[in-house]
Image (cartoon, coloured by chain):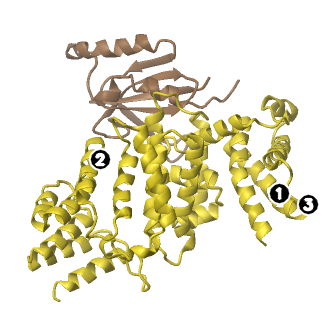
Chain colours: A yellow, B brown
Amino acid sequence: MEAGDAVATLVREEGTRVLATLVRVTGSIDLAEDATQDAVVRALEAWPRDGVPANPRGWLTVTAKRRAIDLIRRESRRPEKEAAAMGLLDSAPEPPEVVRDDLLRLVFTCCHPSLSTEAQVALALRTLGGLSTAEVARGLLVTEATMTRRLSRAKQKIAQARIPYRVPPAEELPDRLAGVAATVYLIFNEGYAAGTGPDLVRVALTAEAIRVARLLLSLMPDEPTVLGLLALLLLQDSRRSARIDAAGRLVLLPDQDRSRWDVTLIKEGVELVGTGLRRTPERPDAYVVQAAIAACHALAPSYDATDWDSVISWYDVLLRIHDTGVIRLNRGVAVAERDGPAAGLSVVDAIDGLDRYPWWHGVRAELLHRLGRTADAREAYERALALDLNAPQSEHLRRRMAALDG
Amino acid sequence: MPKYIALTFTADVDWTDPQYAHEMKDWTEFGEAAEAVIRGGDALYPTATATTVRVDGGKGGDVITSDGPYAETKEALTGFYLLECADLDEAVRWAAKIPAAWTGAVEVRPVIDFGP
């Protein structure tokens, strides 16, 4: 059983790399997927029975290439020529640096800015994460038919518009990498929002995102964005089991049982933050800074003992890189903890454009409550609850509103 | 090499009006810079000159013409370029240099090659 699991993990890890190589040599994601899928199925049959071959990746690649030739033969009238043109008949193993570049190409193609965010997320999960279409569909709460259409439209656009299978040149890399990171972060949040709910496929998206972020770090070990992304995901994930109580209710940071935080993840995350900061002395990367803020919380023995000065100055750094209302709101919360609710409220009230954001109202309500302005607090809770929230979130706000009477 | 059409959406202006002469400089500059990839293209008269044609009741049916463009939008289709580029990234790089990209928007679409 355990040997079978190890084989399954190995096949999945290598399958992503083999797929990346096949996309390059065949020039078609569809063909590469079919061929790789076939090789994966064969490996899962053969390896537990006959043992894992000395070069698993080479075995999978050769098997997938043979399958691709068969598929071309079936569809084309000039098979040998096409297969030869694609270099499929050349069974020499790809050197590791070529495989690394193939994976990078796959990453940047799946997260190309001319694809919709939805399409990027779906493609990344399907190709980089190696999830089945059905699993991706369940993870993203759409029907399998919808996901099949979404994936096929995305692959069609890549083929028809000729989205290049290429690592972007140095001058475009920072922007493109930010796009890749945003997609991975979105995948993480899909899973994180599902909490520890019954839908394990959704929850597993956090693990998927971390897996892809680790893959990115192995490909680009010196990129601050990647270091910061992985650090941020690990530090947020470290709090996962403390975020929901036994009754399935949302527990926010101040009330979390810190003994339930995952110390191993925190340690790794904090180390990555350090490495990321050393790589960007002048202008820190936004992900590294967000991870630094998460690290401040992760290292605090209790909510009250949080180093709010550090948190606030990291928010100031973050606002210089990336000024958004939500970041200002979070800074406002930290100001309230350090300087009291009145100071916090004046920061929060000065933020424009968050009228449709439930947590702006939620934070205002909390601060108004602390200031004893019960009627204003109630109104703010009601405005928050009128907006788009998931069940645990609105349940949390209702509980807080009920506490106004206590 | 694949071809892309770059449709330029801008204010619905009459490019022949002398008041746009100074803007023409930017367009000429683009035309010269992109000479190697431009395979065609033209500026269009304003949408007031447009006629939209439909045939009602299937092929051979009644021809219905109506005054104005197919879609009324804030920014109108006022020109196009046909660009021959290696891939979408190159086409987008060129599209970003078309003046409409900062006065309006440019839509880049791959052109179908039906082969010989």
Query: Quick one: label 1, few (<14), some, or many (20+) residues within 10 Å?
Result: many
Q: Position of residue A122 (x, y in %)?
A: 55, 54
Query: Quick one: label 2, few (<14), some, or many (20+) residues within 10 Å?
Result: many
Along the viewing direction, whichever of A240 and B85 lies nearer the viewer: A240
Callout 2 amino acid: Leu
Q: Which residue is mark 3?
A: A50
Q: Position of residue A313 (x, y in %)?
A: 24, 50
Q: On the rendered structure, is A302 left or right of A287?
A: left
Quadrant where the N terminus of chain A sits is bottom right
Residue A355 appears in view: no
Q: Place residue B51 in its image quadrant.
A: top left
Alpha-carbon span between mark 2 and mark 1: 47 Å
Query: Quick one: label 3, few (<14), some, or many (20+) residues within 10 Å?
Result: few
Callout 1 amino acid: Ala
What is the chain letter for disc 2?
A
- Residue at 31% across, 28% down: B102
Q: In the image, which disc is placed on residue A43?
A: 1
- Residue at 16% across, 70% down: A367
* Badge 2 or badge 1: first in the primary sequence: 1
Alpha-carbon span between mark 1 and mark 3: 10 Å
Mark 1 or 3: in front is: 3
What is the chain letter for disc 3?
A
Along the viewing direction, whichever of B106 and A313 lies nearer the viewer: A313
- Residue at 9% across, 78% down: A372
